[in-house]
Structure formats: structure tokens, C-alpha cells
Image (cartoon, rainbow, N blue to C red):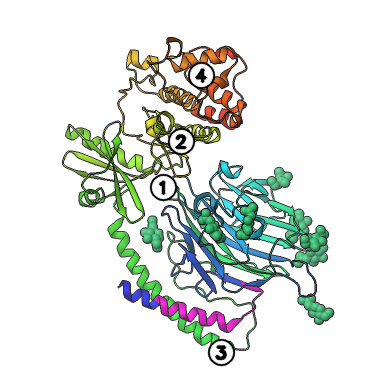
Amino acid sequence: MAITSKSIALTFIFLSYTVSCVSSQRETKFLNHGFLEANLLKFGSSKVHPSGLLELTNTSMRQTGQAFHGFPIPFTNPNSTNTISFSTSFVFAIITPGSGAPGHGLSFVIAPSMDFGQAFPSNYLGLFNTSNNGNSSNRILAIEFDTVQSVEMNDIDDNHVAIDLNGVISIDSAPAAYFDDKQAKNVSLRLASGDLIRVWIEYNATEMMLNVTLAPLEHPKPNFPLLSRKMNLSGILSQENFIGFASSTGTITSTHFVQGWSFSIEGRAAEIDITKLPSLPDSPPSPSPNPPVSLKKSSNNTKQIIIIAASATVVVTIVIILGFWIFRRRQTLITGGARKFSYKTISSATSGFSRSLGEGNTGRFFRGQLAPGETIAVKRITCSTRQQKLSLIARIDTISRIRHRNLTNLLGYSSQGNEVYLIYEYVSNGSLDRFLFSNDRPVLTWSERFNVVRGIATGLQYLHGECQRALIHGNVKSSNVLLDEELQARLGDYGQGNRQSNNTGHAAGELVETAAVQTSDVDVFAFGVLIMEIVCGRRVVEPSRPPGEISLVNWVLQGFRNGNELECCDVRINTNELVEREVLLVLKTGLLCINRSPQVRPVMRRVVQYLDGTASLPQDDNVFNGV
Ligand SMILES: *[C@@H]1O[C@H](CO)[C@@H](O)[C@H](O)[C@H]1NC(C)=O
Ligand SMILES: *[C@@H]1O[C@H](CO)[C@@H](O)[C@H](O)[C@H]1NC(C)=O
Ligand SMILES: *[C@@H]1O[C@H](CO)[C@@H](O)[C@H](O)[C@H]1NC(C)=O
Ligand SMILES: *[C@@H]1O[C@H](CO)[C@@H](O)[C@H](O)[C@H]1NC(C)=O
Ligand SMILES: *[C@@H]1O[C@H](CO)[C@@H](O)[C@H](O)[C@H]1NC(C)=O
Ligand SMILES: *[C@@H]1O[C@H](CO)[C@@H](O)[C@H](O)[C@H]1NC(C)=O
Ligand SMILES: *[C@@H]1O[C@H](CO)[C@@H](O)[C@H](O)[C@H]1NC(C)=O
Ligand SMILES: *[C@@H]1O[C@H](CO)[C@@H](O)[C@H](O)[C@H]1NC(C)=O
């Protein structure tokens, strides 16, 4: 079956090339409802579905996908040196599995070449890499629809639209929103809601104005653009350019789709007819694909019609065959919330549990390889009673729905005998404690540490409030924080009803004394200790030190009282890069979190606000002394 559909698809690709070659060599305007008949070149992970839907990435990790209009577009007026005006409109959707965080975004690109083979995924959006990012010889203009806040790239938030020139550090950006003409106000919009969003990008070379406007699909074009920026693109853009789309995923992922696209040099791009767009995979498939719309008048109409009719027949056949095939696959794959792996798969992926990654809270972690490039971490939990096993499996469904960029995501589970295996994505850089307390890892810089602190806070905030059911982590400590390849913090080992067996000084006093029911307050306390460890590069209790320095908390308090907090910092951090304001912010937040009185400890949402600077710490210095 696979071979048949492949060969049909190849025939079809050949046919669609013929169609576009017949229609024009120097197109300056086009309109595509779906991309079946479009003259589109696809790179990386991008593909066109049988319905005509363009998929730039699926939800696999660290992908990049680009798709370009097959012919270069002349961007100069032969009679002058100025870049000419252009206008484009397209419809996209970003779909994220579960209720998790989306990643990383989609952009419209104008570039002198289609060669993005060396571009990086994640926050480089499949457009740039570390060596060419920001280089003016790129001559690339991109409008990004970014769903991750990359601190490194100075992103304003995790849901913004921005203008990028030659790099992913934007020259202008705004939180995604549209102007509602009736209500005369801005209405914000979630880029990754899964809903269809229509975009208009217009550049007038006379005014030298670039406008970016977006709105929900059914909404008419708003009167005011979201971004409007004066830019002289002559001398920046090349004389001939390729236009298209790029997307990427990182360790958090989304499927990025484009449904339709129109473009025009000089004059307005044709309006997209929303009734002709292909439907998204989850909605019922449309009965037949829509015929292509060619704006160019061709003398060769009959020939085109014959070819189009022929390819339409092929398309219908493919849709039916693939639809049937997908339907059958769906039936076998989707059985419940969490994906269940067979014990055999897990055992062979981990080579019989031979590569240990270390001991977790209630079980040991092993490294495994599901497929080439798909590394996993498997946690083996031995249950002592049948009841324990059943309640753990019951919890897996909840855990698997938790998805956040600062948490290690559960991919599935497996069980055999009295053992349960939790399968997580593998986080490449290992645990934070090795970075902090041993010398076999690079020393984290101040900005990396500050970023890790914020990452952990955001992950905990999500566990405590934003996921469907509030969860207490119960064991926040440096060995439970993993760092990914971009040194972003990923909090692990949550949601299994961890017993508090914490005698490392991370547990709040009232818990030790009364063995009280766990509350989120316990996590706040442990978080406070952890972030002080991150700043100071030492453990909370170090018995080998002189008496006054054994307790980290006392040490920080002394520094705080004597006004030399900076001296508490890990001596391995280069002092030139320390940002005093941030160091103070983290240490004071830490002290507040470990206040002896639980009522004074902030909730994680508040902590995130302190760290982001959207709320200020209490004025009264005494609250930091109450430990
Ligand atoms: C994404 O696409 C690649 C290549 O087509 C495929 O190997 C992978 O299984 C897909 N991933 C998902 C989650 O569908
Ligand atoms: C360029 O100038 C020539 C002569 O003045 C004119 O015929 C032609 O239409 C112009 N081309 C464009 C694209 O404006
Ligand atoms: C970045 O991409 C350019 C080409 O666009 C390539 O020459 C260069 O080697 C790449 N750098 C890295 C670090 O991959
Ligand atoms: C920018 O790229 C050009 C060509 O790839 C290279 O020669 C130049 O050194 C780069 N400039 C910087 C600042 O990296
Ligand atoms: C709407 O948002 C735009 C862009 O952020 C801003 O310039 C404009 O003032 C806002 N308009 C209103 C009515 O809030
Ligand atoms: C851009 O938006 C501004 C403000 O609404 C408008 O005056 C201007 O004509 C627009 N330009 C283009 C090229 O759409
Ligand atoms: C725009 O840039 C081009 C090329 O750098 C330059 O020749 C032109 O004078 C600029 N136009 C304006 C109005 O600044
Ligand atoms: C660009 O702006 C000028 C001046 O406002 C206007 O005359 C012209 O029609 C605009 N061009 C396009 C393509 O919108």
C-alpha cells in the first residue's frame, strides 16, 4: 500500500509541476487555496497533505520546515533602483497536542535563496543559525508568528508577531492582537489556539511603510495594522527574491499549517476565499479538493484544463486512498490519553536497561533510543502492591496531559509484572546539580542561571495552577531539574505522588514536624532554597565549612545584613557579568519563599511576577529576615 501511494504521489508531483510550468515563468501574482496545484518547493519537514494543506512541521522535536514559491520574484522596478511594493495574505493554524505549550512558530520569509538547510530549529525558527544570525549579508526579511518567549532573542512574550531583518532578534514586535473596528479596540489573539488566522503583509515602497495585520479567519481585514513600520527595503532586499514560509519545533512542538496564500507585486494581493480552503486534519475532510485559481491569463487554457482535470482525478483517488489508510492507522494507534508502549519495545530501546542515568525519587532512570534521533529516558518504578501499581497507572493519564516547556514531558508508559515504566523525552544536558556542585560541567554564567531560575519558577507555576488540575511537585531540588541543549530548565519527576523523603534541608519545617498534607507551599519553600543554591553554587548544608558558613541560608542572611550580597555568589561566576539587581532579586525572592511563616511565602504566580519585574518585592526589608 505504501509503495502504491508513493508512486501515485510522485506521478502527481510531476503533473503539478507541468501545470505550473505551463502557466508562467515570471509570475508576479498568484493565489493558492490549498497547495495541491501550487508551484511550491518544500524543504526539511514540510509536506503538502492530500487535502492541499501545507504542513511545515509536525510535532516531532527539533524540526525545521520551509516551503517556497517555485520561482524567484523580481523585487525591483526596471526603471528605478527602488524596491517595489508588495502585498501578501495567507491563512495559518498552529496546533499543539494536549493542553501544552506550543513551539516554536511560523514565519513568512523573503530571501535571496531557498537554502535554509543549515538553519537551526527552536528559537532560530528554521531561518538562521548561530553563525549567520544578525548578519546583514543575509538580506532576509521575515515576519514571525512566535509562540515561545526566547529570552536570548529578547522576545517580548510567548505569543507575538514581529519583524525580523537578517536575524531572529526582532526590530519590531507586538503581542498578537487585531483591531476590532466595531468595538474600536484591540482584541488579543492566541497564535497557537489551533484556530485559523489570516494575515496581511503589505509594503508600499513610496511610503516605505511595512504593515502587518492579522485577524481570526472569519473577521474582515481590520482597519489598523498590528505592526506598521517605516523601512527602506531598497539596499536591504535583493533584486530577486524567493518568498515562502518557515517553521521550527524544539523540545516543545506544534504542527504548523498554512491553508492558503496570495501574493502580488504592486497592487493588493487577491483576497483569499475562505470557503475554498482545505480543512484541518481534525475537522471532517472536504468532499473534493478545490480547483486551483490562476490569476494569470494563459493562452494555453485547454491544455491546462485537461491537465488539471487529470490531476484532480488523481488527487481525489489519493485523498480516498490516504483517507482510508489514515483512518485505519488511527484506529490502531489511538487507544487513550497516554501512549502505551510494549515492554519489548522499551526493553530493546534501553538495551535491556543497561544505560543507567541515575536514581530518581521512586525509581531508576535509564537512557534509551526509540528510533534513530529519538532518545528517551525511562523511569523504572517497582511497585510493592497491586494497589500501588493501579493507582500509578491511573495517574499516568493526568501526567501525560501536562505539557510545558519547563517540564520534562511524558511520552508514554509501559508495564510488566509489578513494574511500571514511564517514558520521558530525553533532556540532553543532564541535571542541574552537576552543573552547580561538580566540576565536570561548564560553569553556568549569571544570565544562564537567572534564566534557569525563571524557567523553574514558570514550570512550577504551571504545575500549581495552569494545568487542568493543580499538582504539587513535592520534591523540588537541583537533581530534579534537567537542562536541555539550550540550557533551559526542565523540571522533572512530578505527579507521581512522591513521598516526602526529603532530608537534605529542602523541606519546610512544618512538614517535618507534622507530616502535614502536602500543599503548594512546600514547593515554594523548596524552590526558595534551590534558587539560593543556584546563585551561590553551593549546597544548602555543607558540614565541612567553618561553622558560620555551614548553612547556606545563614550565609545568605549574613551577606544580606552586611550589604555584600554579591559576595555570596558562586565564585566561579565572572564578576563582570553579575547583574547586581538580578542577584538581589533572586536572593530576596529566595528568602521570601523560605519565610518561617507560610502565610508570608508568595505563590508561584507571584514569584514569576517578581522575577519578570512585573511586580515588586515587598518594601519592608524585615520580611526577608523572617527565616
Ligand atoms: C513527523 O514527520 C516525520 C517525517 O515525515 C515522521 O518520521 C515522524 O514520525 C512524524 N512525527 C509525528 C509525531 O507524526
Ligand atoms: C519603464 O519605462 C518604460 C519607458 O519609459 C515604460 O515603457 C515601462 O512601462 C516602464 N516599466 C515599468 C515596470 O514601469
Ligand atoms: C549557518 O548557515 C550558513 C549557511 O546559511 C553556513 O555556511 C554555516 O556553516 C552555518 N553555521 C552553523 C554553525 O551551522
Ligand atoms: C557575515 O557573513 C559574511 C558572508 O557569509 C561573512 O563574510 C562575514 O564575516 C559575516 N559577518 C559577521 C559579522 O559574522
Ligand atoms: C492597538 O494596538 C496597536 C499596536 O500595538 C497600538 O498602536 C494602538 O494604539 C492600539 N489601539 C488601541 C485603541 O488600543
Ligand atoms: C499602513 O498602515 C497605515 C496606518 O493604518 C496606513 O496609513 C498606510 O496606508 C498603510 N500602508 C500600507 C502599505 O498598507
Ligand atoms: C533607501 O535606500 C537606498 C539604498 O540604500 C538609498 O539609495 C535611498 O536613497 C534610500 N531612500 C531614502 C528615501 O532614504
Ligand atoms: C503607495 O503610497 C502612495 C502614496 O500614499 C500611493 O499613491 C500608492 O498608490 C501606494 N501604492 C500601493 C501599491 O499601495
Q: Amino acid at mark 2?
A: Gly
Q: Is residue 126 magenta?
A: no
Label 2 near label 3: C-beta < 8 Å? no
Badge 2 marks a residue whose secondary structure is helix
Foreground pick, 177 / 352:
352
Magenta range: 9-30
Q: Amino acid at mark 3?
A: Thr
Q: Is residue 12 magenta?
A: yes
580 w.r.t. 548: above or below? below
Packing grade of label 1 (10 A; few <14, some 14-19, many >=20) is: few
For the N terminus, the quadrant is bottom left
Quarter of the figure with residue 395: top left
Label at residue 591: 4
As measured in the structure, the alpha-carbon distance from the residue carrying label 1 to the one carrying label 2 is 16 Å
As measured in the structure, the alpha-carbon distance from the residue carrying label 3 to the one carrying label 2 is 60 Å
Chain-order first, disc 3 or disc 4: 3
Chain-order first, disc 1 or disc 2: 1
Task: Provide residue 448's location: percent of width, then percent of height.
Answer: 52, 36
Residue drawn at x 62%, y 50% is 161
Q: Which residue is mark 2?
A: 459
Q: Which residue is mark 3?
A: 302
Q: Is residue 613 left or right of residue 104?
A: right
Location of ligand 6 given as a quarter of the image: bottom right
Camera sees residue 207: no
Label 2 near label 4: C-beta < 8 Å? no
Badge 1 marks a residue whose secondary structure is loop
Q: Amino acid at mark 4?
A: Leu
Task: Provide residue 320's location: percent of width, then percent of height.
Answer: 37, 73
